[in-house]
Image (cartoon, rainbow, N blue to C red):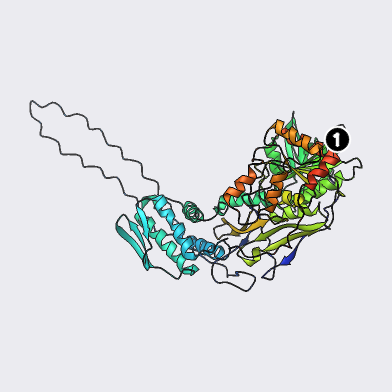
């Protein structure tokens, strides 16, 4: 489907309450646009504002390779009359030289660790000191070389190789970032000088090992991503190299447009799927491969791109001029199923809400439209703000989510106002056991406001928010800093979203649930009531007791069929909507997590 109307800018996700600190910091679920941080001093009330780090790229010397030494040829034995003729001497072949061990820019390693310690300190869900983080991270040395251990029981921190001390340092004050970063760097250098296993690690591998050990002591979602992977992730969030936003395919001898990205410059142009690409900037495509022509489409951002195309059924080609742009990957796909529109949302990237808005604009022009199905199965989440803005497209007003953490800047009541673009048409949301994070926030917001019926299985239950720091090595640090609370005050973490209509117990159970629904009751009412009554902190046993009513599972074809049935039976839909309890609790108050 194509949408020509602009993004509905009147839809706004706003923060109605900002607690404890001035300024708004936008939290993310798994993904956000990071800002470069440097660990030196702290700035004003808005958070750390350190001067830029200027590491000196001086690499430590590497021990010279040891040459292979061959024994000298022994002197010949004196010959006698009876002695046989001496055998021919076979020359010995020298072993190839060993590859040089990698050098490591230790000043950069120090800068990365110092930046990380400064960023972690005020943001983790539970309070930990720079001492904790550093000693956890230095556990990587034992992981790399089991003969290396630490003794931190006294006033000194000691690095040991078996019983032999390699290095001893007086323990700095627990929260002194710079001193603990220096200690970490000194110990890494000492370990490299002693251990071949540690010395063999590249800089990125050494840092990865340090942070892997550190984050083993925190939640499962906090993590370090090295420079290469971080660059790929950033491109996925914001778009890579600039291009036209079209996908090409081979059709016989011709190269044709197979798809058009709704976020790209080609979306509003006179380009359609099936068009044959004749030339790109006056370069003829005849005889070229799809990868070659795709490369022609790429170039500097905002640079001109002239395409010569021939549409099917036409004899004359036409020319389209575009400006290249960085195009985030498409995350929303739409198709019509009779009078019902299905929106498949695969992730929440920087343009997901705008894509949804475009499709909703077009869908609502059809006067025969009876309802909407939002398919979030397999959606692992993404940008929190995009989930809130997507909720704002379908809600008139209200709280979409609450985030609560130790850092005052992580505390928000995410409220929406604007207007329902569908004019209150019936909406069903499909979820499964892989639906997570931002996708769970959208499903919970629509369900708790009685705006949609959720169908499928219990979702993953990822209700922790990460904030991201870009490190001096171009890697990224994802740190969990807040918990998500749904509009009716229940925690998403661990519990997940409980659907009104469960389809994970088999076809027979689903048919019984629909039969019960037709009689004016909801088969899953007890689990819905229990999940909305849950409050943080929630024990594992309570979570399991609630989730067993509709265990997490992969989605199936039955989900869409059930969604259509509810839209086509208004009485069923009304019963399922009414199953969500009223909000009898007082207005949410954001408090620091313990």
Question: Where, quadrant-wise, is the C terminus in this rendering?
Answer: bottom right
Q: Position of residue 218 (x, y in %)?
A: 53, 56
Q: Position of residue 344 (x, y in %)?
A: 75, 42
Q: Position of residue 141 (x, y in %)?
A: 41, 54
Residue at the spot of label 1: 338
Q: Nearer the viewer, residue 82 or 380?
A: 380
Q: Is there any visible trace of residue 462 in the rendered image? A: yes
Q: Residues within 10 Å of mark 1 (few under 14, many from 20)?
A: few
In screen coordinates, is 355 left or right of 51? right
Question: Where, quadrant-wise, is the N terminus in this rendering?
Answer: top right
Quadrant for residue 458, please give it: top right
Q: Nearer the viewer, residue 5 or 288?
A: 5
Q: Position of residue 474 (x, y in %)?
A: 57, 57
Q: Nearer the viewer, residue 384 or 542?
A: 542
Q: Does 171 appear above or below 200?
A: below
Q: Is there any visible trace of residue 63 in the rendered image? A: no
């Amino acid at each position: 489907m194509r949408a020509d109307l602009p993004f509905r800018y009147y839809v706004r996700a706003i923060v109605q309450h900002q607690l404890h600190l001035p300024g708004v910091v936008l939290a993310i679920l798994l993904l956000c646009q990071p800002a470069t941080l440097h660990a030196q001093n702290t700035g004003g009330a808005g958070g750390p504002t350190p001067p830029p780090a200027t590491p000196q790229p001086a690499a430590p010397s590497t021990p010279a390779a040891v040459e292979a030494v061959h024994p000298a040829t022994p002197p010949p034995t004196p010959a006698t009359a009876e002695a046989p003729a001496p055998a021919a001497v076979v020359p010995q072949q020298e072993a190839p030289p060993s590859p040089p061990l990698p050098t490591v820019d230790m000043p950069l390693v120090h800068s990365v660790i110092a930046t990380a310690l400064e960023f972690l300190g005020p943001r983790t869900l539970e309070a930990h000191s720079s001492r904790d983080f550093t000693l956890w991270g230095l556990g990587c040395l034992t992981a790399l070389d089991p003969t290396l251990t630490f003794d931190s029981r006294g006033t000194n921190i000691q690095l040991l190789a078996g019983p032999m001390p390699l290095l001893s340092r007086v323990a700095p004050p627990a929260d002194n970032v710079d001193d603990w970063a220096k200690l970490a760097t000194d110990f890494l250098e000492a370990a490299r000088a002693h251990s071949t296993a540690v010395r063999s690690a590249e800089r990125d591998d050494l840092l990865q090992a340090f942070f892997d050990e550190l984050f083993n002591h925190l939640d499962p979602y906090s993590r370090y991503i090295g420079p290469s992977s971080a660059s790929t992730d950033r491109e996925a969030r914001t778009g890579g190299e600039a291009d036209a936003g079209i996908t090409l395919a081979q059709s016989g001898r011709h190269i044709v447009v197979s798809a058009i990205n709704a976020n790209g410059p080609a979306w509003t142009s006179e380009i359609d799927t099936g068009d044959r690409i004749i030339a790109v900037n006056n370069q003829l495509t005849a005889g070229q491969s799809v990868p070659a022509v795709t490369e022609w489409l790429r170039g500097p951002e905002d640079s001109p791109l002239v395409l010569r195309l021939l549409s099917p059924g036409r004899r004359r080609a036409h020319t389209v001029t575009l400006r290249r742009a960085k195009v985030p990957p498409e995350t929303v796909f739409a198709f019509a199923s009779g009078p019902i529109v299905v929106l498949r949302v695969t992730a929440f990237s920087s343009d997901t809400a705008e894509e949804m808005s475009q499709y909703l604009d077009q869908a609502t022009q059809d006067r025969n439209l009876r309802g909407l199905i939002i398919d979030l199965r397999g959606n692992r989440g993404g940008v929190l703000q995009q989930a809130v803005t997507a909720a704002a497209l379908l809600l008139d007003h209200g709280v979409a989510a609450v985030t609560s953490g130790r850092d005052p800047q992580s505390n928000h009541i995410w409220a929406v106002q604007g207007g329902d673009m569908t004019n209150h048409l019936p909406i069903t949301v499909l979820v499964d056991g892989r639906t997570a994070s931002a996708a769970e926030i959208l499903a919970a917001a629509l369900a708790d406001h009685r705006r949609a019926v959720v169908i499928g299985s219990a979702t993953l239950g990822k209700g922790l928010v990460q904030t991201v720091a870009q490190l001096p090595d171009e890697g990224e640090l994802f740190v969990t800093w807040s918990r998500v609370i749904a509009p009716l005050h229940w925690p998403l973490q661990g519990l997940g979203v409980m659907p009104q209509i469960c389809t994970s117990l088999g076809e027979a159970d689903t048919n019984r649930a629909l039969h019960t629904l037709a009689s004016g009751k909801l088969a899953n009412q007890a689990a819905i009531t229990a999940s909305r009554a849950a409050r943080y902190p929630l024990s594992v046993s309570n979570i399991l007791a609630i989730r067993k009513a509709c265990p997490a599972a992969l989605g199936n074809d039955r989900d869409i069929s059930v969604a259509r049935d509810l839209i086509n039976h208004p009485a069923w839909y009304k019963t399922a909507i009414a199953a969500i309890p009223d909000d009898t609790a007082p207005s949410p108050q954001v408090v620091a997590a313990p």
